[in-house]
Amino acid sequence: MHSDYERHTDGMRRCDPWEQVLADASPHDHIVQLYQDHDFLNSAVCRYVGAGLANGDRIILFPTLTHWNDFRQRLETERVNVQAARERGQLIVVDANELLPRLLRDAMPDPHVFNDVIGDVFRQASAGGSYQKLRAWGELVNILWERGDIAASMNLEDLFDQLNKKIGIAMFCSYVMDNFNGDVHAVMLPRLGTNHTHLIPVEDYARLERAVAEALRETAGPDEARVLESQLLSRYQPPYCMPRSQALLLALRQFLPAIADPVLQRSRNLYSAAKAA
C-alpha cells in the first residue's frame, strides 16, 4: 500500500477521493476505474490529463476515436490548450482501435510485440525532453473486455503492469464494468487487484458509503450491522486501495457470502435511488 493511505483503527486505510487519486498519480501507480456512465469516464480521464499537464508531466493516451473526441472537447471547455500540448510533445494520442490488432497473435497479446511496440513508446517518452514524469491512460484492455475476450484482456493488463514495474510511470485504465454485479465482485475485482494499486469503483464515494451502510442495517439489523462492519474491516486485507464501503462489500463476500449478494443488490438500489432523488 502507498504512504498516502493512513491506517485507521478498524484496519482500513484512508482512501482519498478519486479526483485526488488521479490528480496526484505517482510513478508505479496503476489505477483502475469501473464505469457505466460515459460522463464519469470523461470526468475521470480529463481530471487525470488536466492535472498531469498542469504538473508538467508527459501524457500518453490510448483511446478510441469516439472517446478522444469527447475528452478533447471537455478539456478545451476546461481551458486546456490541447493542440499546443500535442505540438510541444507533452500530450501523445494513439488510436486504440488501430493499435490493438498489432499487439495480438492468435487473438492473444504477444509479449514480444508488446515490448517492441508499447515498450518503445514508453521508454522514448520517459527518456526525452523536459518532462520528468510520465502518465498514461488507455482502453486497450477494455476493448478486449467488452468483446468478451476476458483472458486476452487480463493478459494485456498483466503486460502493462509488468512494464510499469520496470520503468515506473503512472498508469490509469477504465473498464465498462458494473460495480454492483455479484460476478464482478466474486471474480473480476480480486483479479484486478493482482495488477492494480487503486480501485475507483463508483463516482460518488459518499453516496456509496450511505447505501452500503443502510443495506447492511436492513439485511443484518442495526445492532448486528455495527458489529459486523468493525469485525469485517479489521479482518479484511484489500488487494488495492479503495473506498472503505467498497472494502466492506468485498469483505462480506469473503467472510459472509450468504448475505453478500443481498447487501450488494440492496446497495445498488439505494445508490441508484439517491442519484435519482
Image: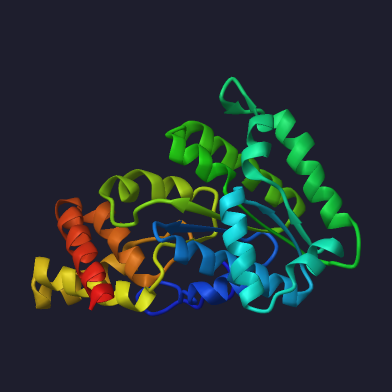
Foreground of the two, 155 or 277: 277
The residue under the point 57% across, 61% down is: 70
- Quadrant for the C terminus, please: bottom left
Q: How is the image coloured?
A: rainbow
Q: Which of the two residues, 70 or 213, is positioned nearer the viewer here?
A: 70
Where is residue 100? Give x, y as percent.
63, 36
Q: In which quarter of the image is residue 162?
A: top right
> In the image, 50: left or right of 154?
right
- Taking 3 as reference, is 84 left or right? right
Instruction: Give the residue displayed 77% in from the left and 42% down from the top.
Output: 119
Q: Which residue is drawn at 41% across and 79% down?
A: 8
Q: How many labels does the image show?
A: 0
Q: Residue 268 is drawn in which quadrant?
A: bottom left
Which quadrant of the view contains residue 125? bottom right
Residue 114: give x, y in percent of width and height.
Answer: 71, 35
Quadrant (top left/top right/bottom left/bottom right) for the N terminus? bottom right
Residue 212 in sight in this render: no
Q: Residue furthest right?
A: 129
Q: Which residue is drawn at 83% across and 67% down?
A: 132
Residue 202 visible to an observer of this rendering: yes
Query: Residue 46: x, y in percent?
Result: 60, 68
- Position above or below: 44 against 159: below
Judging depth in this view, the residue of 88 and 190 nearest the camera is 88
Q: Residue furthest toward the top? A: 106
